[in-house]
């Protein structure tokens, strides 16, 4: 009886150890409080849990975005999160603007490796930069496709943006110097009312984020920044090298999203969540299945 009890205890200990080992295979994926980040966090989580035996704890919608996520990542509290090249260069590394998107990406890759032991991987393909948008009928009337085209007719058009955009060197002041804009009128708009203002023809041109789901709803055209004034904000996955060393199988999984999400596709997904009120989990799952990744 005594021997039997010992054997039972030993088996119980083994099962407990196995259970602990399995439970310890866990990573934390964080995201900013942006629609597309909720979607990307879901994509990364679903891919990892489908293709590995790692459990994912999600921490989406972290207030303060990069300013709170980056320090947490440096402390090892977060393993993975989606970030933007322009944000990494200007906000985290605090380096001078690099206009060439490829050079910018190489710079942030090296900067993060050297300073934070963090790897950039899985450059998705879409660029969530600042942009200028007009109604389709305005674009067709004046044959406007680029910012330079817009400058030819800007004296006939009204521009709308939030107050601080007019005061920023990387906002209206810089655009004015680069393209020579001199609009008929400039209006200060609440950031939440810009789309209503252009829909009602209160203004003809507004500043936007280039992956905003409302661009589709309002039928707006995002013009080409032909002199590359705005920095690139291409999205990619950040992962700590410590996490990759612990779970090397992650590297191949994280590369699955490389060049797989276009601007039109992320706009569509943002639209489904923001306007159609679909669950980011379902939108992410449907997209991954459509791409043959799940």
Image: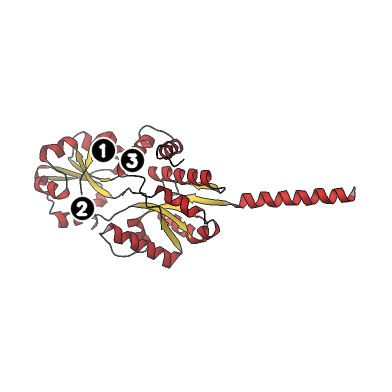
Distance from disc 1 to disc 2, alpha carbons, whole Å, reads 18 Å
**Residue 116 versus residue 209 in the image, above or below:** below
For this view, does 136 lie left or right of residue 246?
left
Dot 3: what SS?
helix
The residue nearer to you, when weighing 125 against 129, is 125
Dot 2: what SS?
helix
Q: Which residue is mark 2?
A: 172
Q: Which residue is mark 1?
A: 195
The residue nearer to you, when weighing 227 against 286, is 286
Circles 3 and 1: CB distance less than 8 Å?
Answer: no
**Residue 90 versus residue 223 in the image, above or below:** below
Count residues near mark 1 (Cα–Cα under 10 Å), then give few for <14, some for 14-19, many for 20+: many
**Picture residue at 33% right of the left edge, 37% below the top:** 268
For this view, does 179 lie left or right of residue 170?
left
Which of the two discs, 3 and 2, labels the residue nearer the N terminus? 2
Q: Which residue is mark 3?
A: 265
**Picture residue at 37% right of the left edge, 52% below the top:** 123
Q: Residue furthest bottom?
A: 114
Location of residue 21 in the rendering, given as x and y in whole percent from the top left corner: 64, 52
Nearer the observer, disc 3 or disc 2? 3
């Amino acid at each position: 009886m005594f021997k039997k009890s010992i054997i039972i205890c030993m088996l119980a200990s083994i099962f407990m150890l196995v259970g602990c080992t399995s439970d310890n295979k866990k990573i934390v994926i964080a995201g900013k409080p942006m629609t597309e980040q909720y979607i990307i966090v879901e994509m990364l989580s679903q891919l990892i849990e489908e293709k590995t035996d790692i459990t994912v704890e999600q921490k989406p919608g972290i207030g303060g975005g990069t300013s709170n996520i980056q320090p947490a990542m440096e402390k090892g509290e977060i393993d993975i999160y989606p970030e933007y090249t322009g944000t990494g260069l200007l906000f985290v590394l605090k380096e001078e603007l690099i206009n060439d998107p490829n050079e910018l990406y190489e710079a942030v890759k090296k900067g993060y490796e050297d300073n934070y032991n963090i790897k950039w991987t899985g450059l998705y393909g879409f660029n969530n930069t600042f942009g200028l948008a007009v109604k389709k009928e305005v674009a067709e009337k004046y044959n406007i496709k680029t910012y330079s085209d817009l400058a030819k007719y800007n004296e006939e058009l009204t521009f709308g943006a939030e107050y601080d955009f007019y005061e920023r060197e990387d906002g209206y002041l810089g655009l004015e110097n680069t393209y020579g804009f001199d609009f008929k009128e400039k209006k200060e708009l609440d950031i939440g009312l810009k789309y209503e203002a252009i829909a009602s023809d209160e203004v003809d041109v507004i500043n936007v984020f280039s992956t905003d789901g409302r661009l589709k709803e309002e039928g707006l055209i995002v013009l080409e920044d032909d002199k590359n004034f705005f920095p690139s904000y291409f999205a990619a996955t950040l992962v700590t090298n410590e996490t990759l060393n612990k779970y090397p199988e992650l590297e191949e999984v994280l590369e699955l999203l490389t060049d797989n999400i276009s601007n039109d596709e992320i706009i569509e997904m943002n639209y489904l969540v923001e306007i159609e009120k679909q669950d980011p989990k379902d939108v992410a799952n449907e997209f991954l299945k459509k791409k043959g990744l799940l």
